[in-house]
Image: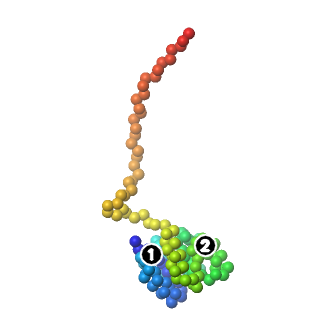
């Protein structure tokens, strides 16, 4: 299954290297974007500049990976936005790739039609009515005097 990654990173050299690492290392479709589209499925990799261009609160912030400097202003912005994965441009690419993979696992998945040969969910149905059980005739109690 191919995962989509929207890449909104202003440094063209870093963005190209990250795109190459993603496409060489796994089933990733990398889409460079100026402004991320939150309506599209997949992971969003943003830098500080891209984060400043989006409206808060973020929908599904668990699928965002923020590449930022490690200073209090940027880290607090990530915290307030609810972003779970924060990495630095100075981090090893393996760390960045791991953060992207983790975000892909956390991202909501679209409901797909069942593939051929798989069991598909059955639509909700009205439960069958169950007729009342026959009850044995009530035992009559006699008064003993």
Question: Quick one: SS at disc 2?
Answer: helix
Going by the image, does 60 lie left or right of 4? right
Q: Position of residue 33 (x, y in %)?
A: 48, 81
Question: Residue visible at 34% across and 60% down?
Answer: 118
Residue on which the image places disc 2: 81
Question: Quick one: SS at disc 1?
Answer: strand
Q: Position of residue 18 (x, y in %)?
A: 49, 84
Badge 2: few (under 14), some or many (20 or more) residues near its Cα, within 10 Å? Answer: some
Q: Nearer the viewer, residue 94 or 51?
A: 94
Question: Residue visible at 52% across and 76% down?
Answer: 98
Q: Position of residue 100 (x, y in %)?
A: 51, 76
Image height check: is 136 above or below 131? above
Going by the image, does 26 lie left or right of 102? left
Q: Position of residue 60 (x, y in %)?
A: 54, 69
Residue at the bottom extreme of this rendering: 13
Q: Visible in this render: residue 53?
A: no
Q: Nearer the viewer, mark 2 or mark 1?
A: 1
Q: Nearer the viewer, residue 2 or 42?
A: 2
Question: Residue visible at 37% across and 58% down?
Answer: 120
Residue on which the image places disc 1: 4
Residue at the top extreme of this rendering: 145
Image height check: is 73 above or below 82? below
Q: Which numbered disc flags the more N-terminal residue, 2 or 1?
A: 1
Question: Residue visible at 50% across and 78% down?
Answer: 97
Quarter of the picture holding the N terminus: bottom left
Q: Visible in this render: residue 145?
A: yes
Going by the image, does 91 lie left or right of 126? right
Quarter of the picture holding the C terminus: top right
Badge 1: few (under 14), some or many (20 or more) residues near its Cα, within 10 Å? Answer: some
């Amino acid at each position: 299954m191919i995962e989509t990654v929207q890449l909104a990173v202003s440094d063209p050299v870093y963005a190209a290297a990250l795109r190459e690492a993603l496409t060489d290392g796994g089933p990733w479709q990398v889409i460079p974007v100026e402004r991320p589209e939150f309506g599209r499925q997949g992971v969003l990799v943003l830098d500080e500049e891209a984060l400043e261009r989006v409206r808060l609160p973020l929908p599904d912030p668990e699928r965002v990976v923020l590449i930022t400097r490690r200073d209090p202003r940027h880290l607090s912005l990530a915290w307030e936005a609810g972003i779970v994965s924060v990495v630095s441009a100075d981090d090893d690419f393996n760390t960045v790739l791991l953060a992207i993979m983790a975000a892909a696992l956390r991202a909501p998945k679209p409901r797909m039609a069942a593939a051929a040969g798989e069991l598909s969910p059955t639509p909700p149905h009205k439960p069958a009515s169950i007729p009342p059980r026959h009850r044995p005739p009530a035992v009559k109690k006699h008064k003993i005097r």
